Amino acid sequence: MTDHIEQDQAAANDELSPAERLVLIEAQHRSLDQKIIELQARPWQNQLLVQRLKKEKLRLKEVIERLKGEMIPDLNA
């Protein structure tokens, strides 16, 4: 089921401009950060879930950096 949602999101992202994708992904990154903070505040936190969220947050950060790099023109060209 998660794969289906990710495919739908990927298809929707293809229709967005790089700037729009960047805003969307940055919002997802902030949302994950908030979820991680909330989970870590609980004494009975689910370590596996926290690890998965952190991994996804890192993946989103890499996508953000790639998109920013694509949006900035190559100054050496």
Image: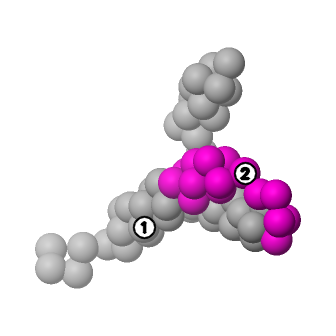
Using the rendered view, name the quadrant where residue 3 is placed: top right
Tag 2 secondary structure: loop
Please report the residue visible at 65 percent of the width from the left and 26 percent of the height from the top.
2
Q: Disc 2 and disc 1: Cα gap in Å?
A: 29 Å
Majority secondary structure of the magenta segment? Answer: helix
* Residue 56 visible in the snapshot: yes
Magenta span of residues: 41-57
* Vertical order, 71 against 1 (above or below): below
Question: Residue 75's spot in the image, x, y percent?
Answer: 22, 81
Q: Amino acid at mark 2?
A: Asn
Question: Residue 57's spot in the image, x, y percent?
Answer: 57, 59
Q: Nearer the viewer, mark 2 or mark 1?
A: 2
The residue where tag 1 is placed is: 65
Q: Give whichever of 30, 55 is nearer the camera.
A: 55
Using the rendered view, name the quadrant where residue 26 is placed: bottom right
Q: Residue furthest left?
A: 76
- The quadrant the C terminus occupies is bottom left
- The quadrant the N terminus occupies is top right
**Picture disc at residue 46:** 2
